[in-house]
Image: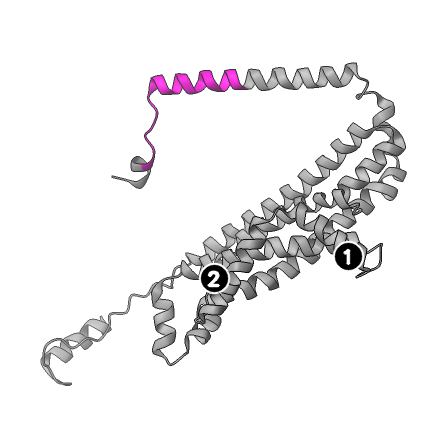
Amino acid sequence: MSAQAVLFDAPGPKAKRRHAIFTIVGSAVIAVLLVSVVYRLSTQGQLEAAKWTPFLTASPWLNYLIPGLIGTLSAAVVSVIAAGMLGLVLGVGRLSDLAWVRWLSGIVVEFFRAVPVLIMMIFLFIIFSRNGVFLPSVNPFMAVVIALTLYNGSVIAELVRSGVNSLPKGQAEAGLSIGLTPGQTLREIELPQALVAMLPALMGQLVVVIKDTALGYGITYSELLNQAKNLGSGYSNTLPAYMVAAALFIVINYAMTNLAGSVERRLKRRGHTAAPVTTTVPNIVQGHAEPGDVADDAAEGQTTT
């Protein structure tokens, strides 16, 4: 019995008809909702050409959308790099042989995974602003980056830990058998393999970081969502501005999702690469024959035929 037959039963005629009915009804409901939304937008004047024509000019893009996009990507890139380094340190700490290192790393990871990112941003922004830690213009950026780094670093630490634990036990045993310490085995053998295996998940986490930069809206960070609000206020087209910003987020995240999928497919293809085929028959002496005996001559005859 195949695995597919065990996990999924092929639908029969009645099930196929039922699925078709559900598909038609669901599509009709979605179509009605879309028509209703478009009608409401039209009656409220949100689809008027005057509200959308500014996006065909350069000023909204140069003064609002592109600076906001740069702010979003800047915070995302810095956060991803910092979170990757923090996650690697915390992940290795959770796998350490020292109990106090494991406990300390675990407390840090679980704490920052539990605290909402927006609360961390607001808390850091207040601390930085009241104590003059950074320049006033830099405070929002640093609050966003540090909050995203702490949260996503904790998530990456769990990815590192689960990636190492998912490796076959023989990997660690092989390292220990050749004289490596547990720490050397982790760094030299297990961790490189785990990083390659979790690369698609890491790239998927980049999508989360890009979306979470929009939380900087609450602390006046000049990212895409905040700039869309300013654009809507300046051109009296708030809803169209938000819709364009949402479309930009969708395009960026869709591109990152496709990139993560392509990396995962490439890793899978590389992981299943077959070794070159050979037809050579090994020269094996069976029994207790000595070199030059009949059994040895017969084996040599097999390799030359």
Residue 128 bears which disc, if any? 1
Q: Which residues are magenta?
A: 7-26
Residue type of the residue flagged with mark 1:
Phe
Q: Is residue 233 left or right of residue 242?
A: right
The one nearer the camera, 109 or 298, is: 109
Residue 302 bears which disc, if any? none
Residue 24 is covered by the magenta coloring: yes
Q: Residue at x 75, y 37 (%)?
A: 245
Observer able to see residue 74: no
Q: Residue 84 sits in which quadrant?
A: bottom right
Q: Which residue is mark 2?
A: 194
Distance CA(mark 2)–CA(mark 1): 37 Å
Residue 202 lies, in percent from the top left, at 56, 54
Q: Is residue 187 above or below residue 28?
A: below
Observer able to see residue 52: yes
- Identify the secondary structure beneath mark 1: helix
Q: Residue 252 sits in which quadrant?
A: top right
Residue 187 lies, in percent from the top left, at 48, 71
Q: Residue at x 50, y 56 (%)?
A: 158
Query: Who comes first in sequence, dot 2 or dot 1?
Result: 1
Q: Nearer the viewer, mark 2 or mark 1?
A: 1
The one nearer the camera, 266 or 165, is: 165
